[in-house]
């Protein structure tokens, strides 16, 4: 298998790029989806209950409360990441193991690619990019958060400028969707030629 990472800071358009790649018939693994699944696992919920008891009611984690804790305290964020990242790495290794005999292109949509050091598992890295003000506006409208909350989330991620330096390809998503789709299709054609 050839594994291509799609990454970029919050609001930069990686999910839109991933959707377009899926529309072209490719498999795109969604790490945010893996994270959502974690919050249904009893072993993971029990671990959250141990560390952040005020965020768990029965078998439900109040993600807004949890987010308020971790995005206001860097040490708490690192603690949560130390709990989630091993689960996610196991999912990733399982995906690689199950598809290792394939010669197809597979994609992984992962915001914290470099923060988790997952680029070591990938053959190529695509970074979605957009100007900061557009990024902020997108997130505030989509997630219904204020500017201060956006900054808290954005400030714990690696800056997109650094991600772009580590990328094999950068796609600026500040363009009409038809032009963005054309750019994605051209990139897919290049990746297919390399395969």
Image: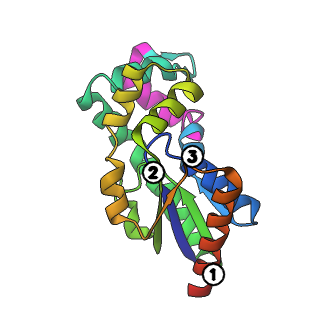
* Left or right relative to 182: residue 164: left
Task: Specify the color scheme.
Answer: rainbow
Give the residue number, with chain letter if any, for mark 1. Answer: 192
In the depicted structure, whether residue 5 falls above or below residue 137: below
> Where does the image place residue 24, in percent across and percent down from the top left?
75, 65
Mark 1 / mark 3, whichever is N-terminal? 3
Q: Evaluate whether residue 113 shows in this view.
A: yes
Give the residue number, with chain letter if any, for mark 3. Answer: 34
> Where does the image place residue 181, in percent across and percent down from the top left?
68, 60
| The N terminus sits in image quarter | bottom right
Give the residue number, with chain letter if any, for mark 2. Answer: 8
The magenta span reads: 37-54
Q: CA distance from mark 1 to mark 3?
A: 27 Å
Among the 4 quarters of the image, the one containing residue 131: top left
Tag 2–tag 1 contact (CB < 8 Å): no
The residue mark sitting in front, 1 or 3, is 1
Q: CA distance from mark 2 to mark 3?
A: 18 Å
């Amino acid at each position: 298998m050839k594994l291509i990472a799609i990454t970029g800071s919050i609001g930069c358009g990686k999910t839109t790029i991933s959707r377009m790649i899926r529309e072209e018939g490719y498999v795109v693994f969604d790490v945010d989806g893996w994270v959502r699944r974690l919050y249904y696992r009893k072993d993971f919920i029990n671990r959250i209950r141990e560390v952040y008891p005020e965020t768990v009611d029965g078998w439900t984690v109040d993600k807004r409360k949890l987010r308020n804790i971790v995005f206001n305290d860097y040490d708490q964020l690192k603690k949560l990441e130390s709990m989630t990242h091993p689960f996610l790495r196991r999912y990733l290794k399982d995906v690689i193991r199950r598809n290792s005999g394939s010669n197809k292109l597979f994609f992984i949509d992962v915001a914290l690619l470099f923060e988790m050091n997952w680029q070591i598992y990938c053959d190529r890295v695509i970074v979605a990019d957009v100007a900061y003000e557009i990024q902020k506006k997108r997130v505030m409208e989509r997630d219904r958060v204020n500017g201060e909350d956006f900054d808290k989330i954005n400030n714990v991620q690696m800056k997109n400028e650094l991600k772009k330096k580590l990328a094999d390809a950068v796609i600026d998503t500040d363009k009409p969707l038809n032009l963005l789709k054309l750019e994605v299709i051209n990139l897919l054609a290049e990746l297919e030629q390399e395969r």
